[in-house]
Amino acid sequence: MSKRILAVDDDPDIVDVIKIILEDEGYEVSTLTSGKNILNVISSIRPDLILLDVMLGGMDGREICKSIKSHAIFKYIPIVMISATHNLQSLLKLPDSPNDFLSKPFDIENLLFKVKKQLYIGR
């Protein structure tokens, strides 16, 4: 069974690119362009990994990450935060923090490395 990934970014072009890259690698990819109703989406698709942008059109991805990590059912889902403007390294040591981060613009190899790493750790 292929691993399920949820990609969340307010730029439809970015989620489309992520979806194409990851589906080419055999992953099942769902996308959102907003953080609204994300907990319902997570509950229904049960992703193995979440790729989450920091700036989501008026919503803060870091707060969404904390919300996901505060749920007993969801807290073990690895989250990789994506940002063009924030250095997220400092967030990785905080409670309810993302598991990793990826800077925009990202290259395909780095995206795939981080995805594979988090899916392997999460086994």
Image (cartoon, helix red, strand yellow):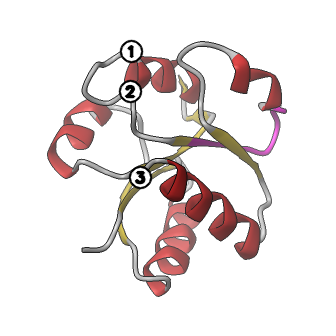
Q: Position of residue 22 (x, y in %)?
A: 50, 74
Does 86 appear in magenta?
A: yes
Q: Amino acid at mark 2?
A: Lys
Q: Amino acid at mark 3?
A: Arg
Of residues 36 and 96, the one nearer the viewer is 96
Reading the image, the residue beneath label 2 is: 75
Label 2 vs 1, first from the N-terminus: 1
Reading the image, the residue beneath label 1 is: 70
Label 1 vs 3, first from the N-terminus: 1
Q: Residue at x 84, y 33 (%)?
A: 87
Q: Which mark is residue 102?
A: none
Q: Which residues are magenta?
A: 80-87
What secondary structure is found at the residue carrying circle 3?
loop
Quick one: quadrant of the N terminus? bottom left
Q: Residue at x 49, y 83 (%)?
A: 25
Q: Residue at x 48, y 86 (%)?
A: 24
Say which quarter of the image contains residue 94. Answer: top right
Q: Residue at x 41, y 52 (%)?
A: 123
Label 3 vs 2, first from the N-terminus: 2
Of residues 32 and 118, the one nearer the viewer is 118
Packing grade of label 3 (10 A; few <14, some 14-19, many >=20) is few
Reading the image, the residue beneath label 3 is: 123
Does 2 appear in magenta?
A: no
Badge 2 vs badge 1, beta-carbon distance below 8 Å: yes
Q: In front: mark 1 or mark 3?
A: 3
* Residue sitting at the far bottom: 24
What secondary structure is found at the residue carrying circle 1?
loop
Residue 28 to residue 119: above or below: below
Residue 75 to residue 46: above or below: above
Q: Position of residue 91 (x, y in %)?
A: 72, 22
User: How far, Cα to Cα, is label 1 from label 3?
Assistant: 20 Å
